[in-house]
Amino acid sequence: MFTPGSKLFLGLTGFSIAVCVIYVALVDNSVGGAVALLSIAAATALLAGLSLFNRDGEVAVGAADAPASAEQLTASLWPLIATVGFVGVVAGLITHPIVFFLGLIALLAAGVEWLIQSWSEGASSDKVYNASLRGRMLHPIEFPVLALVGLGIVILSFSRVMLAVSRDAGAIIFIIAGAVVLFVGSIFALKPNLKKTLVVGICVVSAVGVAASGIAAATNGKRTDLVVANEEDHFSHKECGEEVDEHFDHLSEGTISLRSNPVATVELRDGKLTARELGLDKVTQTITFPRSNSATIIFRNKDNEEARLTAFLGTKAVQDGVVEEVLDCTQMIGKDHEQALTFKIAKPSMASDKPYTLTVPGLEGQSIEIMVP
Amino acid sequence: MSTKIRRIAAGVSGLAATAFLAGCAKDAPQDTWQPKGTNAKTIDDLQQPVFAIAGVIGVIVTCVVVYCIIKFRDRGQAMPEQTHGKPALEIGMTILPALILAGVGVFTFRTVFDLSKTSDTQMVVNVTGQQWWWEYDYPAQPELGIDKPIITSGQMIIPVGTKVLLRETSRDVIHSYWIPALNGKRDAVPGRVHTLRIDADEPGIYAGQCTEFCGLSHANMRMETVALSKEDFAAWVANQLTDAKSPAENTLAKEGEAVFLNQCVRCHQVNGLKKADGTPAIAAPDENVWSGAAPNLTHLMSRNTFAGASWDLLSQKCRADVWGASSETVGKKYLAGVSEECLNQTDLRRWLRNAPAMKPMYADPTKLTPTNGKYRGMPNLGLTEDDIDKLVAYLSTLK
């Protein structure tokens, strides 16, 4: 009367109800947990009903010409993986959350695979049919997950390589890799009769090569300038004196922030500092800056010497009777480069003893006044 | 046709007629069909013919559908012979709408490019949205008499016949600025500056409303643009560039100034206001308000609305006098500001008594955890009636 599939789901239903009773009686009598467990019971009961209704997907269980089930013959790795997962879960509880989650994933994956495999192998005496039954159940899950994992490994490995090689070499590698992928992909598309084993072989070798390169690159570490910049807190530094960072952004005009609608552009040309405000088609020595709202100014260097723009944003009390200037600045940029400087001034100009200004250190007598209404 | 169907049809027709006739309202300050500026007229020049074309097509399609419904309704007749495909008709019915859309598209693109033109801008105003009011600051523009930045809120003042570039941004969430009589709408987005050009043909007060849902009091985030003649605009600028004067000693207003210094200056700036020790009183909305700003009240009584332009500072009679004035006289009447006789004390007192009760805001101190203790909007300050009397007297002096 009961098919193998329905027995499985009925067992899960009974198990969920039993756990629910124990949970409510002994652990927590609040509604949330009980609802979750009863929902599982309801879902598995529905699946049990469906299994009974369609006789486990048209399998001729109990038919006269075939035994209802066959002995399980396939050796399975899932018990071993489930054990590893279980160990990972236990070890993760006392070591690191990532170990716990990896163990949990392995345990759940092994559990599902093992259950479905065992069920399908006992579904009929026809092994081919049993295998197709398993595929119908698991392939919609296995293929996307495996593809995701494979892509993740390739992307992660490639990114490790890009972080390890120099910036110039990275650009060359990226161009070559892209061209190779395009070329090989085109060959595959133009030659549909290529041997499947050849295509699979090329893909596997490529993936393994990228993964091996990634492992090697990760072992070798990031390139020096990234390490140094990280150690010096280069990415957030605001030292407005002499530039001390060796690895500042020499290609600063490529930054995305430059497209963020600056309120003004400040230009250094022939030793003179001038500004242009958005929408006002004239050169000025005074710009109006929004109060209490972050806004961006673009600094453009047209002189031969490297220069930086420094913003004086008032003073702040650091202790009783002691105040220090609040400064913000761009990095040093070379000729024909530009960089964005984003800052916020909370108080109007009248709140500052000295005007808010933009200056270039070392350039005497040149400044742009920032007026804050 | 059954009685029930007739009744339903009559009801639907009545509703449709009511909705249609509502468009004929005389007092419709946000009517998109009454352009008063170059850009608004450019949009109108596009939307009028497009609306006409769409209307004609809509009527034709509706008539054909109704004709088919009646003509071929089920009367028990035999099923007619079914045919498949009429290539000529199908191609025709594809090409004709495509041609119509292409024609509309050409003119739409031309309009879009016309509207985005900013090279001949004559004046710039920074427009900053925050929950739930608009702030306007005018960068220094000496050629217009603006020697130093001007800041105001609720009502933006522009000279008539001048191409004004609005540089819009926001301090908190996305808002959208729209004065239908002067141009289309443009989003004000935090971290970005979007530009919108407006100009007004004749003096007047043009109403608008935030058109991007921005939170609890979105519906109470209104704004007006006041177009003045160039002479009147110069007078307005001259007034805005002055600092507020302290009221005379031993007056109620002077006592109100003390209340203001004690309560209001935490967020609201009044230029020229000094503390008891003679140093300038500097507001710190950045420390108290989530958006980091509160309206500058230096010339509060020079504008005739408050609280996000949602309530009038003018009494009903005086408001009607200013808003209903002809284009020749509206400037003078607007510049007169809010006199003692015209002050709408009722709403101003209600606001001072309990602002969140008038305009829903997140200003309950018990619910300020998400904003790190900062208000969104004006809180209930718990002022006494005595304090309110003094404050009203003081605020009345801010002209």
Image (cartoon, coloured by chain):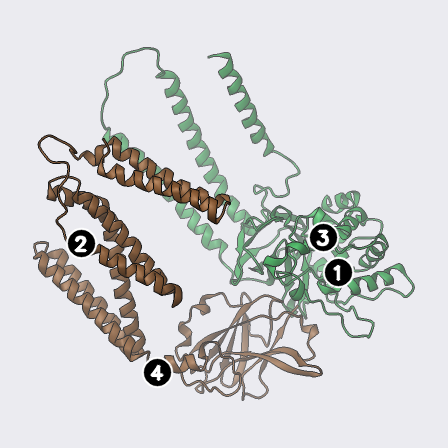
Q: Is residue A61 left or right of residue B392?
A: left
Q: The residue tagged with tag 3: helix, strand or loop?
A: strand
Mark 3 to mark 4 CA distance (whole Å): 59 Å
**Chain under numbered label 1:** B
Mark-to-mark CA distance, 4 and 1: 59 Å
Q: Position of residue A9 (x, y in %)?
A: 29, 40
| The image quarter in which residue A100 lies | bottom left
Residue under circle 3?
B306
Are the residues under badges 2 and 4 in a single subunit? Answer: yes
Q: Which residue is mark 4?
A: A224
Q: Residue at x 72, y 69 (%)?
A: B282
Q: CA distance from mark 2 to mark 4?
A: 47 Å
Query: A214 or A287, which is in the foreground?
Result: A214
* Mark 3 or 4, closer to the camera: 4
User: How far is mark 1 from mark 3, CA to CA?
Assistant: 12 Å
Q: Quadrant of the N terminus of chain A?
A: top left
